[in-house]
Structures are given as C-alpha cells and as structure tokens.
Amino acid sequence: MNHTTVHLNFSKADKLFLWLMLPLIGLVIGYFLPPISEWASKLEWVPFQGPFKLVASLNAGWVIFATMAFGLLAGIILTLVIYDEILNIYISEDTLVFKIGKVEMKYLKDDISYIYIDHKDLVVIGHEGQEIFRYKKEISTKILKEELGELGYLFKDGNPYKEQFKKWVPGLTDLSLEADALLKAREMMLKNDNSEEALQIAIELWKLHVSVKEIEAKQYYRVA
C-alpha cells in the first residue's frame, strides 16, 4: 500500500457505542448473574441448568467479581468479533483494499472505473461496466465520498444500473449454467446465514461479469 492509507469501518459514534456499551452491558449482566443463577437453578424448565447451578453453588464473595470480569471480557470479545466481520476499507492513492473476516480483496485504482452506493452497499465498477465488488458498508456515505475523492477515486451519486437488475428465478434466466448454479448455491448460503460463503460465491459471479444483490431476501442479478 502507499504511505497514505485511510482505514474506514465504523463512524466515531458507532465506535464509542461498541467500545463503551457492549463491555458495560457485559459488566452489568455479570453483576446480576449470581442472583439470576440462584433463581434459575430452582426452575427445572429453564435451559442451561448446569452453568446456573454451578454459579449458584458458589457462595464465596469473589463470585460476583468473577462474573463481572467474565461479562466485561465477553463484551470486549464481542466488540472485536463485530469489528472483524464488518467491511473494513483501506484506501490509498493506488489501491483499494476490502477486508471482511478472513476475506481480503485488493483492487488497483487503474482497474476501477467508479464507485457508487446502492442503498447500504458499496459498489465498485470495472471498466466494462461490471461489478467487481459489492458489500454492505458501515461508514457514512459522506465520509466515504470525501476520503475516496481526496485520494483520486471517482464517486458517482445514485445507482446507474437500478433498472437493469432482474429477479433471479432458478433455470428461467438468460444466465449461463455456471452462473445459475452459483446463484442456487448462494441462495442456500444466505438461507443458512453463511455470509462468508455467500461472499465467496459472489466473488465467483463477479468474475463472470454477473452482479448480484438481495431485495427483500430475493436475489437480483445484472449481466455486464
């Protein structure tokens, strides 16, 4: 990457909420866990009887401090997991890098025609009008537009391809058999809430110049 690299994910307000509120919520839950465990352990229909009975059986004064520490740690870990799973954007003068969990995609500025926002999705368009990246962003459009513009990327307002997307119906499209099979597999991943695999399949579709997005849990596609 170039020496000047901007990293974008959450807004300052969202970061403040995540780093303060989630650990604080964990701390509060940890504080009330001992009395809750004592109450729940007496009700056989309540699930997780094992952990509740274990906490209830510990009458030492240190228990509440241990559960509070555990709650605080759980809140911090949850925050880190959220940071890892959302879209992280790294902008430099010659490259644009996206990281989502274990997936990392790098694009040269010379391979990018322009960028636009489709609802909450950040969309990157190649020189043949094809989508080469699409994913839900967390950062505000205003900040994203400013940072991209400062580093020389073309950002367009609105969705120039809005009318070109078609609802995908298995076997009843103008797509190739390969693209149709990929959309079937992606639909299954979406139903199973497997976002990482759904992204990997979308990457394969982009290679075929097939764009894909969801509207009300249905897949829509566009061929460039």
Image: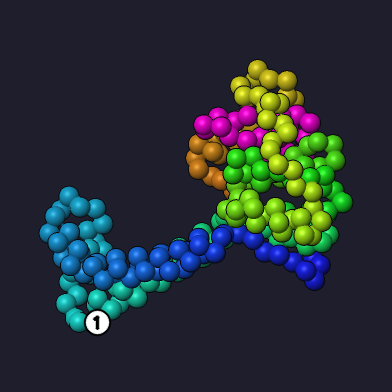
Magenta-span inclusion, residue 60: no
Q: Which quarter of the figure has residue 128?
A: top right
Q: Residue at x 29, y 73 (%)?
A: 67
Can the viewer see residue 103 in this picture? Answer: no
Q: Which quarter of the figure has residue 99?
A: bottom right
Magenta span of residues: 200-224
* Amino acid type indicated by mark 1: Trp
User: In the current view of this chain or complex, which residue is farthest to the top?
Assistant: 172
Can the viewer see residue 183 in this picture? Answer: yes
Q: Quadrant of the C terminus?
A: top right
| Label 1 packing within 10 angstroms: few (<14), some (14-19), many (20+) | few
Q: Residue 137: give x, y in percent of width and height.
A: 60, 50
For residue 40, above or below residue 66: above
Magenta-span inclusion, residue 222: yes
For residue 170, above or below residue 13: above
Front-most of residues 161 and 220: 161
For residue 81, above or below residue 154: below
User: In the current view of this chain or complex, which residue is farthest to the bottom?
Assistant: 61
Q: Residue 80: give x, y in percent of width and height.
A: 51, 65
For residue 184, above or below residue 34: above
The residue labelled by disc 1 is 62
Please name the colour scheme applied to the rendered image.
rainbow
User: Helix or strand or loop: what does disc 1 sit on?
Assistant: loop
Q: How many marks?
A: 1
Q: Residue 88: give x, y in percent of width and height.
A: 63, 58
Q: Residue 179: give x, y in percent of width and height.
A: 71, 30
